[in-house]
Amino acid sequence: MFVLPPPPPRYSVPLAYAAGASNGMAVPVVETNNVIRHPEGGCPLQVGEGTYDLQDDLHLATPPPHPSEAPITNPNPLATTPSPPTSGVKLSLVSLGPRRKTPQLYSVRLGSGGISDLKSIKENIREGRLSDSGSDSFRRSNGSAPAFGEGNPALASPSGKDGLKRRKPKNNIIKSSSSFVSRVIMHESATKRLSERNPDGLFAFANINRAFQWLDLSSKSKEEPLAKILFTKAHMLCHDVNELTKTASHIDVIMGSSAGDIIWYEPMSQKYARINKNGVVNNSPVAHIKWIPGSENLFLAAHANGQLVVYDKEKEDAFFTPELNQIPEKANGKPNARKALQVLKSVNSRNQKNNPVAIWRLSNQRINQFAFSPDHRHLAVVLEDGSLRVMDYLREEVMDIFTSYYGGLICVCWSPDGKYIVTGGQDDLVTIWSLAERKIVARCQGHNSWVSAVAFDPWRCDERTYRFGSVGDDCRLLLWDFSVGMLHRPKALQATARQRNSIVVPGTQHLSRHRTDSTSNRVRSNSDQTDKPEDDFEDTIIHPVEPRARTAQLPPIMSKIVGEDPICWLGFQEDCIMTSSLEGHIRTWSRPREGVNENHANNLSTVTGFGSGSGSATEP
């Protein structure tokens, strides 16, 4: 009997993972050098303010698997290719010179309907450690937050000169004898390039499977990395640069791996340290990692087993056992369901001699990404279970849980003013949420596959209009303009408006009022609380999925296929837009010249719809 073969994969995988790798066969892949192209007239982005021209396409070399790397198996019997432990190429950008910083458009105006309103309400009702000192009151009045762990003397910074000195890791990664590091390739004239480079230029750190590259994007030879690290037993999945500690001679980089190990890397001195070695604290992969804002030593890692772990770059690791007094109480032999966050170790714990500093369990499913709010108080976390969880991470509490339309949520970011959260996920939707109103604002339709990254463009945001972008597995880059007045009225609300002048059926008015109150979720029911005061905010508001008929829809102003492989990262700079793809393509689009359309924002607010050029710029 003739059996049809399974269909080919929709998208290709990195070349180093040909079909032979799944059964241990040798893979005939030879590592090559990075390649850069400067296409002329290729893949322009047409938007209302002008044309974004593709400046260059830097293709990173995909390293072949290490000979000791275990064969990759895929449990799907119909799979034609293995699934490598990779999340695609991600970038961390850093400038050491007087480059213009990201505009902080709303840092002084957070008090009008923003997240500071929620914070002040809670602090007035429930007194905590924030109201004990005058300095904390000053922080609140200026919209800023205290440092994470500030109230714990065990986490106090050392006094004296040693506390002001920038510490570096102890191990030389070039001369390392660790089995975790395969080899390090340094550029032969790296020292000369560093001394002669433009101080206002951008460094980029990029991961591609088991390789990690340090690039100088301001160099004429940007395709030649300053350093390239190859690892043996793991693939790097995520990384971040500490903006607080960076200087002309020092950069702190952290990397999370598929083995759970974390690397603290200082590229100027080529020193490194290995944290969570062999998974002593948590042995699941690190899906996302970020430095905690305002901290020199502390960073947060999201592990695939649903835990958020706070590490200190300078502490030794210790085998972790949950602190019994931090485990939620049990009712009828089951964990307390009202607790949306299990604090396995609190940041306020006095036991801070070793890592971890804190551990929070959110779920048993994978945490895909998280993002810190601009006020450095809230944390937005998206998980494979399809939930968006908003935390007050200073108090170690989950405030709200929102749910995707269906499937898991993959990516998340905050608006520059902290009023809105944008997520993307497996439902092919980009969703806008309002933290102040604690509800969904709009669903954005335009992608044909999973949305892998979302980001705001702070240089195109003002008091009236927000610009953000999204990329996905459909190889598309989409741009969106959003303001409350631009949203289409949902169908259900249109029907309600038409019925205002009609005869009201008895009982309908009460039903409509009850539904409005239940969907807004501004009033939390305390019917299941008998022994807790009403000012206790430890309980979490779980918001139901909003029906599509009651949710505003937002179309993109630009949609463009920008490559042949899935796009997995998106970043906005003052002079360009950048993306990176699964197979290592880093593309850069230069912004339009100034003055091409200076009245773009005003036109968008006055023209019905979404501005000129939105139709012609969107591909079918």
Image (spheres, rainbow, N blue to C red):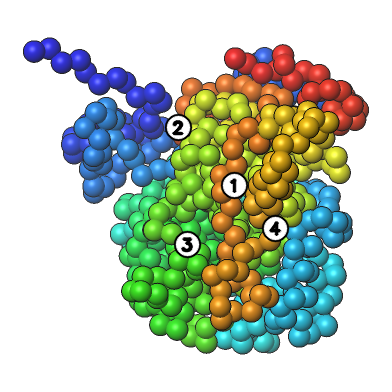
Q: Mark 4 points at which residue?
A: 522
Can you name the residue that lies furthest to the left here? 1
Question: What amino acid type is highlighted by mark number 1?
Answer: Val
The answer for how far apart the CA atoms under marks 4 and 2 are is: 45 Å
435 relative to 525 in the view: left or right: right
The answer for how far apart the CA atoms under marks 4 and 1 are is: 23 Å
Q: Name the residue under label 2.
A: 583
The answer for how far apart the CA atoms under marks 2 and 3 are is: 32 Å
Question: What amino acid type is highlighted by mark number 3?
Answer: Leu
Q: Report the residue at 38% width, 31% height from top.
A: 13
Question: What amino acid type is highlighted by mark number 4?
Answer: Arg
Whether residues under marks 1 and 2 lie with C-beta atoms below 8 angstroms apart, the answer is no
Q: Mark 1 points at which residue?
A: 412
Closer mark to the observer between disc 1 and disc 3: 3
Q: Report the residue at 79% width, 62% height from top.
A: 117
Q: Which of marks 4 and 2 is nearer the N terminus?
A: 4
Can you name the residue that lies furthest to the front here? 506
Q: Report the residue at 51% width, 50% height from top.
A: 387
- Can see residue 580? no
The answer for how far apart the CA atoms under marks 4 and 3 are is: 23 Å
